[in-house]
Image (cartoon, helix red, strand yellow):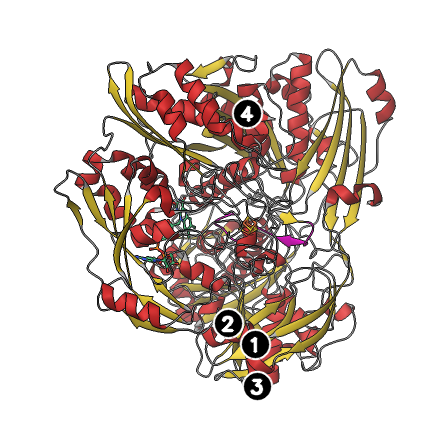
Amino acid sequence: MNSFQYSRASDVADAVRQMGADPTAKFIAGGTNLLDLMKEDVERPTLLIDITRLPLRSVEATPGGGVRIGALVPNSDLSYHPLIEQRYPVVSSAIRAGASQQLRNMATTGGNLLQRTRCAYFYDAVTPCNKRVPGSGCSAINGINRGHAILGMSDSCIATHPSDMCVALAALDATVHVAGPNGERAIDLADFHRLPGDTPERDTNLDRDEIITAIELPARGFAKNYTYLKIRDRLSYAFALVSVAVGLEMDGDTIRQARLALGGVAHKPWRDSEVEAALNGQVASPETFERAADLLLRPAKGFAHNTFKIDLARRAAVRALTQAANGTPQSQSSKKIV
Amino acid sequence: MTPYIGTAISRIDGHAKVTGGAKYAAEFNVPGLVHAFVVVSAITKGSIARIDASEALRVEGVVDVLTHENRPRMADTDDAYKDDVAPDGTPYRPLYDSKIMFSGQPVALVLAEEWEIARFAASLVHVKYEQEAHLTDLYCQREVAFALPEPAKPRGDAAKAFAAADVRHQGEYYVPIEHHNPMELYASTVTWDGGGKLTVYDKTQGVQNVQRYVCSIFGMKPDDVRVMSPYVGGAFGSGLRPQYQVVLAVLAARALERPVRLVLTRQQMYSLGYRPAMIQRIELGASAGGTLDTVTHEAITVTSQYEDFFRNETTWSGLLYRSANAKYTHKLTRLDLPTSCDMRGPSATTGVYALESAMDELAVALRLDPLELRLRCYSDRDQNNGDLPFSSKNLLECYRQGAEIFGWAKRNREPRSMRDGSELVGWGMATGVWEALQVPITVRIVLTANGHAEVACATSDIGTGTYTIMAQVAADALGLPLDNISIKLGDSTLPQSPVEGGSWIAASVSNGIVTTCNAIREELLVLAKNLPGSPLANATRDEVTLLDGRLVNRRDASRALSIAEVMRVSGVDRIAQEKSTSFANDGKHAHNTHSALFAEVKIDEQLGVIRVTRVVSAVAAGRILNPKTAHSQVMGGVVWGIGVALHEETLIDHRFGRVMNANIAEYHIPVNADIQDIKVIFVEEQDNIVNRLGVKGLGEIGLVGVAAAIANAIYHATGKRVRDLPITIDKLQR
Ligand SMILES: Cc1cc2nc3c(=O)[nH]c(=O)nc-3n(C[C@H](O)[C@H](O)[C@H](O)COP(=O)(O)OP(=O)(O)OC[C@H]3O[C@@H](n4cnc5c(N)ncnc54)[C@H](O)[C@@H]3O)c2cc1C
Ligand code: SF4
């Protein structure tokens, strides 16, 4: 771990100004990811700008019927917030599927979006990794890649984005509000995280000197027919091998609107508009779900250890669609899969 | 007064532990403490070409950087580095020379006024290596593994019997490297006591082992080194041998003549010992009636290039079941890793996993209930060892009670035949076995006239409850209330004890306490007889017992004297006795503990998610000193067994020779959600032969057999046999 300076941002403008003034600075929120990476010498910021006192801690209904979530709202507060539990239960559920209660208490909404991959080579400063040291090579492609991507990867990087919450946010068409030296802008969550391409060192389209201020959820919350189904190597406190967020708007047995996002399979939460379009207007049935899942996984490709994820993701998608259509969302406390 | 032995007493050290009063090796504070941080090797094999510490040394607060080039003198013979439990070979010498033998090997030690400074400066030590090709993959080396001497004498002709058997099963079973991951990090705090004397607070399972080791490496006199380890936050075998941090901490204290603390990081602990990876092959041949004709058990296990560590995985097979023919072979392969070491239930956890999986497969081949097969193959003698009878073996009762509580009779033998909604239900069982070992030990007891006794022995309490059972045994033997007993352990200056391991301490120290208590009683009796008009004047040694603070004639309870009174009138304010106890083996009996495990799994048919919903562990381990601590031991073993079956695996990237999941987020062990209903039963097992108290110990037995019971349940649920651990979701899909 390197030596670093610490400062506190007094307001959003000050945070942006401080960040602009120091090209090797980093914001720190809950610190649950950044500090681990610093201990491993993966991140070596010379200045930590503490943003935890900024007034970005509220969850508020918006005039348009949606919700605006401050970037510093802790993951657990967000998960148990009445507005979220009632209107966006898939977000509550996804958060509770992740990490542990202690981590969720510390972790923030903004930090969760920006958590970095759990690829073991990325964490081990001794081995080659294009994401950590651009151009050094990808150790995972021919190495231990059981947890790695099956969709959207490149020859430079096959890492996955580890967040659970983001998978639900992706399914809900969330928007990320950010502030930077040139003012504020909004980025669709779908465009927030990037595919690795040949610049795997860039996880997101957030500029270095920008700060996340809020996440906005549109009115449509899929509170009746939803689920978050996470498959992992133990029944809690493990990252997803595969996860699925589903939101359906049903009209009797007919799907009017479908949202389907996969986690643990790509460098970003994975959505496919073609698959969702194919579900819309269909009768909810095993065949419909199988077809959609096949379509969703058609472009998937496996490596030495993770090929099983293709079929697992397909089955998990079918199961999650079934759970959502039946109005029997997966419980995150009972580990029996409904 | 009801005896304390056999009563479910809460841990006497529990309060200190939960309030933070119990201090662990890294928690002893002394003024002027220097903090150390280890720089570890980035390569797996080769040598250090150059170390440049100049940038680190320029950091304010850095005191020194020690390397093999500038360290103080250390011994230069292999013998000097051999601790009490070292395997054959050339022990590793920390910071000794430029040679690199494993990834994560210490190459420099940064010493600073603050721990954070030491850690930062460590990132500024630049090391250039000469790299050599390394090998860390067992599967690449299995052909060149070399045979060890025969683990036990073969009997009959196993190959011939196998060829002739009515029903045969053979299978190969794999267990990966596993790491101990005790909660407490490895740490040593060394105080500089002046005049070259040191006190070393160390995380260890054997303070006297560490003390001798340190003296021998640094040429110090026994009186100059005191090693203390009053509390240990788990070790599971990783603390049997001294670990490198104690050498480095002492080295630094001697170099600086200052107190030094070194705490390893979690990541660095993956470069200490580990349970060796192994490939085991089992051949079983049975008669159509379901009795075993032959068993062959072969193992290939891994060790380092410099020491040959191994245990006997194979011989459990010919011990557990009756078989006229048996053959064992064990091969070892040397890899560029640190030396493997003991880990809870060493050899049995793994060997019995393979055997009990194979027995399950044999039962399937025989179309026989797996419990019925065990009963038909039951052995009441140790055929490996002169066909001796057991001092006690109540495994039959384990099977009976375990099966009943589990409801085994309701099992449908067909795989995939039981379900609960979307889940397949599987019921599996297995047997566990361990040795009832005992070792020479010395206990000192000081009884004071106020009716208090201090019991002292250099053994450790590695979290198992040794403090508590020692107090219980002493309270009963001295006839005193539990609160009047204080226990001293984990201090090398106390009376002799070997390392705490192999489940031998409970039996050894409790019998040792009785020996010393008897000596105290005899001394009291001499005093009592001399009192004027003593009611015990004519009592013989064997007639007198200590009860409720009194010396009492067993035959006539009215003939009694208060202990305090005897001491006061005799003008004696303390009685001290120190006695050694050793355990003569009569050579006529085998000493073992046993268990029967029953497990239920529920597996989502579509997704393969495995839940272990019930485990029953029925244990026969002689007399149970404390049902509460005993229950915790066995329950912990079951939890661990679930981890062995489903989670634990150290992942090495063989291209780099590095452990890639060196942290407890990615090295999986069970979490609460993975644990559901665990029932632990202790069956009655009276043993008048093994030792005076009939105690057999039960640290290891709780784990042995669990993984097989779960693997067998998974087969029963799915019809799919996975023979390489851990059984993860992808393997069910293969
Ligand atoms: C053992 C373990 C297990 C875990 N398991 C899971 C899991 O199963 N599922 C899951 O989803 N997550 C899991 N997590 C990850 C956890 O969710 C993230 O660490 C957490 O959400 C990060 O939030 P934080 O506020 O602590 O971020 P920090 O660590 O403070 O920051 C992370 C990054 O975001 C930047 N940042 C933070 N806030 C802002 C902002 N407002 N604007 C701009 N930049 C910002 C920081 O500079 C840093 O680069 C796990 C973590 C651990 C340690
Ligand atoms: S997958 Fe990405 S993060 Fe992992 S080693 Fe390759 S480049 Fe690095």
Within 10 Å of disc 2 (Cα), the crowding (few <14, some 14-19, many 20+) is many
Identify the residue at horizontal 82%, vertical 21% (top origin). Answer: B162
Point out the tag, 3 or 4, that comes first from the N-terminus.
3
Looking at the rendering, the stretch of residues picked out in magenta corresponds to: B654-666
Q: Is residue A164 above or below residue B250?
A: above
Residue on which disc 4 sits: B714
Do discs 1 and 2 share a chain? yes
Asked if both marks, 3 and 1, belong to the same chain, the answer given is yes
Q: CA distance from mark 3 to mark 2?
A: 21 Å
Q: Are marks 3 and 1 in contact (CB under 8 Å)?
A: no
Farthest bottom residue in view: B195
Residue B257's label in the rendered image is: 3
Marks 4 and 1 close (CB-CB < 8 Å): no
Q: Position of residue A330 (x, y in %)?
A: 34, 29
The amino acid marked with disc number 1 is: Val
Residue B684 visible in the shown view: no
Label 4, label 1: how far apart the Cα atoms are: 49 Å
Q: Which residue is mark 1?
A: B110
Q: Chain of mark 1?
A: B
